[in-house]
Amino acid sequence: MIQIGDKVPDLLGTDQDGREVRRSDYPGRAIALYFYPKDNTSGCTAEACSLRDGYEAIRALGYEIIGVSKDSARSHQGFIAKHGLPFRLIADTETELHRQFGVWVEKSMYGHKYMGTERSTFLIDAEGVVTHIFRGKEIKTKEHAAQLLKTIQ
């Protein structure tokens, strides 16, 4: 499980267009890598739209935003088009990146236990080192861009 102070892998996955996403694709830039449960659900849409609306301000501070869920590339393409998202989304359908980052966890709903994504955001500096982690209920989906801006300013 990746923690604060750890270096992240260069290869992060494959995006909505089938292209590899590498940390080294963004030389000299930091990354806000956010994991979310599912495209087009209320909380995930609120979070994505918050990040969309704060995108330019976050980029102005030297960060790129990259989203990750276990949805397919096709699902991501529709999500991006429907909500005008300006950032890449990784299709981690086999949950490999989820597991590396420790966000594929046991969850419970109405007494039923299942494996799912813990909503999380990792701030990664230009050298690829994790500097901050937001997890679970700490993330306010409608205000997540403001949370990031407050932390990185």
Image: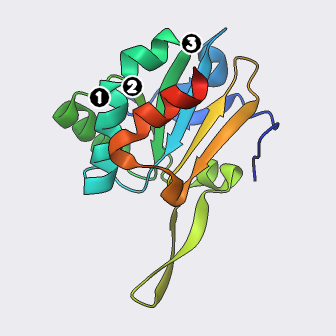
Residue occupying the point 48% across, 43% down: 68
Q: Residue 94, can we see it?
A: no
C-alpha separation, residue under disc 1 versus residue under disc 3: 18 Å
Residue occupying the point 67% across, 56% down: 102
Rendering coords of residue 121 (x, y %): 56, 42
User: What amino acid is found at the position of numbered circle 2 in the picture?
Assistant: Phe
Rendering coords of residue 137 (x, y %): 49, 59
User: What amino acid is found at the position of numbered circle 1 in the picture?
Assistant: Leu
For disc 2, the marked residue is: 87
Q: Nearer the viewer, residue 17 or 33?
A: 33
Rendering coords of residue 119 (x, y %): 50, 54
- Element type where label 3 sits in the image: loop
Of the numbered discs 3 and 2, the one sitting upstream in the chain is 3
Residue occupying the point 75% across, 47% down: 2
For disc 3, the marked residue is: 62
Q: Disc 1 vs disc 2: Cβ atoms closer than 8 Å?
A: yes
For disc 1, the marked residue is: 85
For label 2, the crowd category at 10 Å Cα-Cα, with few meaning under 14, some 14 to 19 and many 20 or more, is some
Q: Residue 21, can we see it?
A: yes
Q: Nearer the viewer, residue 95 or 50?
A: 50
Residue occupying the point 36% across, 55% down: 38
Question: Which picture quadrant has residue 144?
Answer: top left
